[in-house]
Amino acid sequence: MGNRLRTDILAVTWPAGAKLSVRPLSERYNTSTTVAREALSHLAGDWLVQLKPNRGFFVTDLGATELTDLTELRCRVEEFGIALAIERGDLAWESQLIAAHHMMEGTPRRNLSPDRIATTWSDAHSLFHAMLLEPCGLDHLKSLAKTLADITLFYRQLAASTHEAVMRNVASEHTGILNATLARDTVKAGQLLREHYSKSLKVIIASGVLHAGDHQGDDNDD
């Protein structure tokens, strides 16, 4: 159930701040309330779900300051990760990275109804970014990078229909990151990753989808 719930959250099946009650979820995914609660607890550890004492589970609902801090953490983690990857990656890795980039670029990026990032492109995009860090040799770093990427994806989906998101040249950004990595330019690759993630943050903030208010809901978690 956990993977299906994660996929549905990232597809914005529920809006930010929505209550995720255990019993309805167990019925939706045809599983027990115990399994549903465990899945929610796991996603709370990945920051996609928030557990509020005496109130239950909610879809993550971050403010601008929180997302800015998490974006800075992501930048620092991946700047270190890409430096190690460039140092340790071999020719086979370069070939896999080029293939991942080619797959991403050949996949349509947007759905029109609703106007969101296409799941197939999002999967290819995640693979490309994961491949950038693959040879770094630090599983914990790669896991943290993936968690931070998922949080950003959720809010990028919410902001996908805005003018800033539509007009952004994401393909050019990815090509620049790829070229710097293949050139083994550690400084430039890290700088371009930081710029890439900072642009995502700016688009999200400009969209107005971030909320800092407390959401009221049914206190009965079941």
Image (cartoon, grey):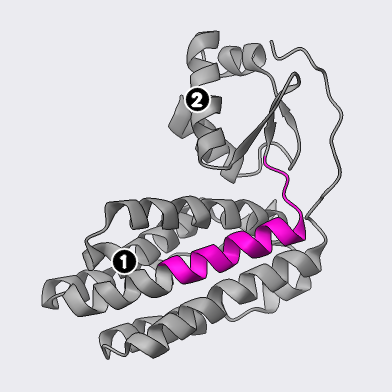
Horizontally, residue 176 falls left or right of residue 205, namely: left
What secondary structure is the magenta-colored segment mainly?
Answer: helix
The percent coordinates of residue 138 (x first, y second) are: 26, 58
The percent coordinates of residue 39 (x first, y second) are: 50, 25
Q: Amino acid at mark 1?
A: Leu
| Residue situated in front as seen by the camera: 161 or 144 | 144
Horizontally, residue 124 falls left or right of residue 15, namely: left
Residue found at x 26% / y 63%: 134
For marks 1 and 2, give the CA distance: 27 Å
Residue found at x 48% / y 50%: 147
- The stretch in magenta equals 60-77
The residue where tag 2 is placed is 39
The residue where tag 1 is placed is 133
Above or below for 154 versus 166: above
Residue 87 can be seen, yes or no? yes
The percent coordinates of residue 3 (x first, y second) are: 44, 33
